Image (cartoon, helix red, strand yellow):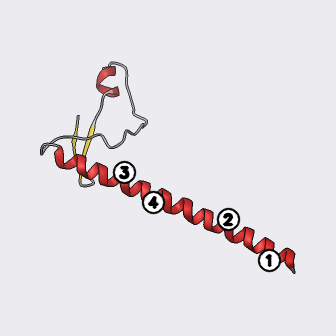
Amino acid sequence: MKYKKVERKTSTGRVREGFDREIHSRREKINVIEFQLEQLEILPIGTELTEREVDSIQEVSIGDILEDVTNTTIVVKDGIITEIR
């Protein structure tokens, strides 16, 4: 019986450690988001931000200008594509 009690304590300790790690991770995410919000307040209206870059497959043909194909930018506002450059 003593062996089972020790095993339960160890299992409980692992669970607590897992919860503590998750709590720490979520607090860090909250801090990052709060910092980003503070930075957004400083930016002038109309400033464009790069949130992420996405690689994609594009069709190219003989005669296409390589720079036009590789330097394409898609502007998204509120989840809607507003411009392709």
Work out how far the residue at label 1 is from the one at label 2, CA to CA, in angstroms: 14 Å
What residue would you read off at disc 1?
5
Q: Earlier in the sequence, mark 1 or mark 2?
A: 1
Give the amino acid type for the residue marked by disc 4 in the picture. Arg
Q: Position of residue 83 (x, y in %)?
A: 21, 42
From the image, state whether disc 1 or disc 2 is nearer to you: 1
Lower sequence index among marks 2 and 4: 2
Asked whether residue 64 is in view, the answer is no
Mark 4 surroundings: few (<14), some (14-19) or many (≥20) residues within 10 A:
few
Q: Which mark is residue 26?
A: 4
Give the mark count. Answer: 4
Residue wearing tag 2: 14
Name the residue furthest left.
Answer: 45
Label 1, label 3: how far apart the Cα atoms are: 41 Å
Instruction: Report the amino acid beneath label 1.
Output: Lys
Tell which tag, 1 or 4, sits nearer the viewer. Answer: 1
For marks 1 and 4, the one nearer the N-term is: 1
Residue that carries the numbered disc 3 in the rendered image = 32
Q: CA distance from mark 3 to mark 2?
A: 27 Å
Give the CA separation, mark 2 to mark 4.
Answer: 18 Å
Query: What is the C-alpha distance between the residues marked 3 and 4?
Result: 10 Å
**From what the image shows, is residue 5 above or below residue 65?**
below
Under tag 2, what secondary structure?
helix
Q: Secondary structure at mark 1?
A: helix
Residue type pointed to by label 2: Arg
Within-10-Å neighbours for mark 2: few <14, some 14–19, many 20+: few
Mark 1 against mark 3, which lies toward the viewer? Answer: 1
Q: Residue shown at 79%/71% (left/top)?
A: 7
User: For the residue labelled by badge 4, is the local secondary structure a helix, a strand or a loop?
Assistant: helix
Q: Residue visible at 27% across and 54% down?
A: 79
Classify residue 81 as left or right of residue 44.
right
